[in-house]
Amino acid sequence: MKKREGFSLLEVLLAFVLFTVGFVAIARVFSIGLFAESDTEKVLITTELAQERVEQIRNLSYNNIVNEPKAAISGFPIFQRQVIITYPQTNLKQIEVRVYYPTKPQENSISLFTYVSDI
């Protein structure tokens, strides 16, 4: 009898299943990495927008620092910003700049704080 060379149908199917499982696992890792990169970019932009507003506010006079309602940021349509002023002591304002950014399934925000005195 002649010995047959090559692969059986079972061996080919098993190799195909193992290749498919490996490919799906690698694709899943890449997709998770892409989503994480997108969220990281939004956090960096959000932080920069908050820091920019804090610096602008610190250049205002004490009496011109007021609350600002949540509103869209010019040039950054998916982000919104709000300024919240509280008075922890007389002649002292605590300024919170909160910037909101969209994520699935809810909206997130980053807040930066600074203090301004009227002394």
Image: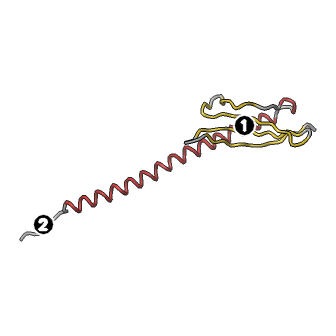
Q: Position of residue 65 (x, y in %)?
A: 82, 32
* Quadrant placement of the C terminus: top right
Identity of the residue drawn at 33% across and 55% down: 20
Apparent side of residue 4 relative to residue 66 in the rendered image (left or right): left
* Quadrant placement of the N terminus: bottom left
Please state which amino acid type lies under the numbered disc 1: Glu
Identity of the residue drawn at 50% across and 46% down: 34
Residue ranking furthest to the front: 105
Q: Secondary structure at mark 1?
A: helix
Residue bearing the label numbered 1: 52
- Write down the quadrant of residue 64 in the picture: top right
Q: Is residue 72 above or below residue 114?
A: above
Label 2 vs label 1: CA separation?
A: 74 Å
Way the structure is coloured: secondary structure
Q: Is residue 90 above or below residue 71?
A: below
Residue bearing the label numbered 2: 4
Q: Position of residue 37 (x, y in %)?
A: 54, 46
Residue ranking furthest to the right: 119
Residue ranking furthest to the bottom: 1
N-terminal of the pair, mark 2 or mark 1, is 2
Q: Secondary structure at mark 2?
A: loop
Badge number at residue 1: none
Residue in the foreground of this view, choosing between 84 and 65: 84
Apparent side of residue 81 relative to residue 103 in the rendered image (left or right): right
